[in-house]
Image: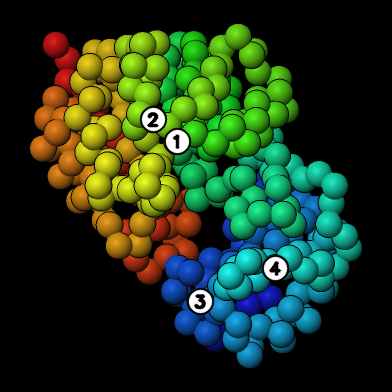
């Protein structure tokens, strides 16, 4: 089997763009299925999902990787532990992708505030958002909003119940010199705030990107359909919906069936694959982005 260090070295690009260098969770390398390696120049981030004997050998080898800082997150612990393997924990860190910048929270939380697997979703929005009114549900730190506005969107409404996440989203928009008049940050529980969600419509693009399980507030299998059945009233003619799902247990046909039952006025267009699709044995186990278009009147 190819040496893990040689794999991440081969996958390293020469520019400052962030990228996943190794995706063990794609199960193509069974001895290393517990290791994920991401590069946010000048930071190399190694995430460990299990404690396995072969990890220490790799961590010693990776010290020679040309990164200023090398961090390890032990994700398998009840409270993930962060370790500085080389350099230091930066006071601030930025992910750069497609000419955009996003703030990272390294060394503090389990999630760092940015998801690399959504890169192709952001790319689609960059290319297709010109003059569109966009609704971004479960916006988190608003990377998709940034992409839409950089792509020329007329206006974006970001809904998320986490004020802390939206605060980072505001910083991300400032980082990208976006006109603040074109973006709204709405700190509400979507499932309890439909009047606030629908009022600014109709929308030309709607993004639905929920966590699989958000406690009592939202559960995919219980609640996703409640959003889908409201799409017709919230959208303009020929509107596009990006319906996202990130569960290893629920496949694309779960979303297709929801639209068939609760939004028959929308036709399926295509699946945008996860940025990690080429690294996965089963692409259906990772992020799914399905595009649907509202049929003309």
Residue at label 2? 190
| Residue topped by disc 3 | 33
Could you tell which of marks 2 and 3 lies nearer the N-terminus? 3
Q: Circle 3 sits in a helix, a strand or a loop, which is it?
A: loop
Q: Quarter of the image holding residue 133?
A: top left
Q: Secondary structure at mark 1?
A: loop
Mark 2 neighbour density, 10 Å: few (under 14) some (14–19) many (20 or more): some
Q: Residues within 10 Å of mark 1 (few under 14, many from 20)?
A: many
Write down the quadrant of residue 46 in the picture: bottom right
Horizontal placement of 45 versus 226: left or right? right
Residue at 42 percent across and 65 percent down: it is 280
Q: Which mark is residue 81?
A: 4
Q: Earlier in the sequence, mark 1 or mark 3?
A: 3
Q: Mark 4 vs mark 2: which is more N-terminal? A: 4
- Depicted 73 relative to depicted 228: above or below: below
- The residue mark sitting in front, 2 or 3, is 2
CA gap between label 3 and label 4 equals 19 Å
Q: Position of residue 183 (x, y in %)?
A: 56, 16
* Residue occupying image coordinates x 55% and y 48%: 115
């Amino acid at each position: 089997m190819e040496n893990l260090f040689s794999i991440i070295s081969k996958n390293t690009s020469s520019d400052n763009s962030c990228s996943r260098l190794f995706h063990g969770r794609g199960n193509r390398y069974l001895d290393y299925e517990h290791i994920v390696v991401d590069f946010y120049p000048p930071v190399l981030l190694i995430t460990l999902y299990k404690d396995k004997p072969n990890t220490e050998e790799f961590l010693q080898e990776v010290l020679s990787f040309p990164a200023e800082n090398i961090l390890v997150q032990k994700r398998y612990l009840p409270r993930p532990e962060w370790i500085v393997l080389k350099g230091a924990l930066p006071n601030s860190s930025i992910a750069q992708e497609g000419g955009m910048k996003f703030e990272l929270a390294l060394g503090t939380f389990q999630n760092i505030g940015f998801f690399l697997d959504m890169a192709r979703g952001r790319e689609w929005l960059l290319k297709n958002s010109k003059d569109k009114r966009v609704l971004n549900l479960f916006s988190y730190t608003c990377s998709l909003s940034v992409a839409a506005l950089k792509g020329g969107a007329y206006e974006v409404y970001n809904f998320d119940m986490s004020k802390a996440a939206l605060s980072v989203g505001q910083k991300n928009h400032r980082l990208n010199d976006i006109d603040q008049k074109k973006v709204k940050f709405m700190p509400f529980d979507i499932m309890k705030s439909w009047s606030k969600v629908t009022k600014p419509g109709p929308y030309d693009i709607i993004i639905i990107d929920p966590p699989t399980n958000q406690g009592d507030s939202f559960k995919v299998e219980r609640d996703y359909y409640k959003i889908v059945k409201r799409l017709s009233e919230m959208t303009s003619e020929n509107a596009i919906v990006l319906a996202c799902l990130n569960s290893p247990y629920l496949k694309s046909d779960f979303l297709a069936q929801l639209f068939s039952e609760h939004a028959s006025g929308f036709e399926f267009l295509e699946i945008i694959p996860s940025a990690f699709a080429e690294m996965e044995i089963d692409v259906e186990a990772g992020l799914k982005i399905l595009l649907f278009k509202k049929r003309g009147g």
